[in-house]
Image (spheres, rainbow, N blue to C red):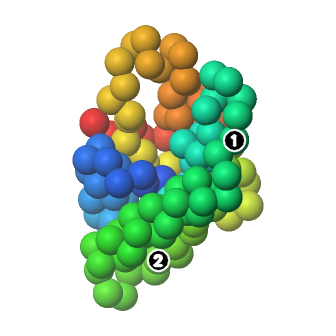
Amino acid sequence: MQFKKILVPVDGSGTADNALRYGVEMAKTYGAQLFVTVVADIGKAAYPLMQVNLDRNGFASVREKAEAVMERIKKQIPQGLPFTPIIRTGVPGSVITSLVDEENIDVIIMGNSGKGSLSSFIMGSVSQYVIHHVKVPVLIIK
């Protein structure tokens, strides 16, 4: 199997950093283009249980955090490696699955959230959502 386009969703966590390292190495090995996305999670700018949105400053803050994560990531990408940074605002699982189709991604490399079973049950797991909604291989990194 040849991988030409690799997608690594990151969120600033340690497991996402591990996934990025795998993504970089895989991109080097296959001569692939590396797509890295940070999703400004609208769920973090709302009170999901009460379905109340924060004001515009709440959404701006989430977007600023995503931009800061991407700036840190850009410094970790080796020069000469084909790299496409993508920042989107939305629901992470949905954004990631959309990018797979939009960019014709061949494989996704992502960290697991490390949430406990109760938290995953209540809020869902981005990695579980992605696995069940894409038709490309998904490598989950711990």
Q: Cβ–Cβ below 8 Å for labels 1 and 2? A: no
Q: Please give the label number shown on residue 53.
A: 1
Q: Position of residue 128 (x, y in %)?
A: 53, 27
Can you identify the residue that label 2 sits on?
Answer: 83
Determine whether, in the image, residue 85 is placed left or right of residue 43. Answer: left
Which quadrant would the C terminus be assigned to in this image?
top left
* 1 or 2: tag closer to the N-terminus: 1
Q: Position of residue 28 (x, y in %)?
A: 33, 71
Relative height, residue 63 to residue 15 (above, below):
below
Q: Position of residue 75 (x, y in %)?
A: 30, 78
Label 1 vs label 2, nearer the camera: 1
Cα separation between marks 1 and 2: 34 Å
Relative height, residue 92 to residue 68 (above, below):
above
Q: Please give the label number shown on residue 84.
A: none
Quarter of image, res 29 = bottom left
Q: Amino acid at mark 2?
A: Phe
Q: Which residue corresponds to the image point at 54% horizontal and 42% vertical from the top-left?
A: 44
Q: Secondary structure at mark 2?
A: strand
Determine whether, in the image, residue 127 is placed left or right of residue 99. Answer: left
The 10 Å Cα crowd at callout 1, few under 14, some 14 to 19, many 20 or more, is some
Residue 18 seen by the camera:
yes
Residue 97 seen by the camera:
no
Q: Which residue corresponds to the image point at 29% horizontal and 44% vertical from the top-left?
A: 15
In-front residue for pair 109/14: 14
Q: Amino acid at mark 1?
A: Asn
In-front residue for pair 31/88: 88
Q: Which residue corresponds to the image point at 67% horizontal and 24% vertical from the top-left?
A: 50
In-front residue for pair 29/119: 119
Q: Secondary structure at mark 1?
A: strand
Relative height, residue 97 to residue 17 (above, below):
above
Q: Position of residue 121 (x, y in %)?
A: 51, 14
